[in-house]
Amino acid sequence: MEAEEMMEFLQEFPEHHKMILDRLNEQREQDRFTDITLIVDGHHFKAHKAFLAACRFFITVFSSPGHVLPQIFSIL
């Protein structure tokens, strides 16, 4: 297929990233597909591990659970 023919099928989605984040937030709010609970000062926050793993701290925690003291962070 030539480049010109391929361009006919090209479609851009400039807001795709926003749509993905909105859908993940909706799922979190509905407690759908959440796989971790963060507890901060007695407040419970449901979350998606994949989303948290965008932060290097959580990659470290998820990759080596013994790296962080259990009294500071525990996976429920």
Image (spheres, grey):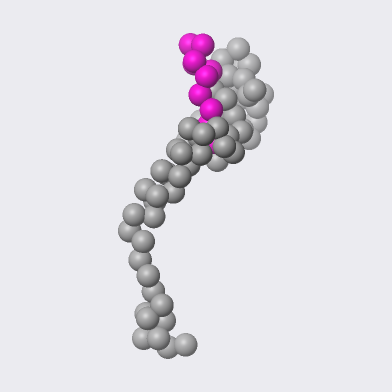
Residue 22 in percent (x, y) is at: 41, 43
* In front of the other: 60 or 4: 4
Residue 11: image quadrant is: bottom left
Residue lying at 48% horizontally and 11% vertically, measured from the top left: 41
Residue lying at 57% horizontally and 25% vertically, measured from the top left: 37
Range drawn in magenta = 39-49
Residue 43 in percent (x, y) is at: 49, 15
Note whether residue 60 is visible.
no
Relative to residue 69, is residue 7 depicted above or below?
Answer: below
SS assignment for the magenta stretch, majority? strand
Residue 2 in percent (x, y) is at: 42, 88
Relative to residue 47, is residue 16 depicted above or below?
Answer: below
Q: Is residue 14 part of the magenta span, yes or no?
A: no
Residue placed furthest toward the front: 30
Residue 61 in percent (x, y) is at: 59, 29
Note whether residue 41 is visible.
yes
* In front of the other: 52 or 16: 16
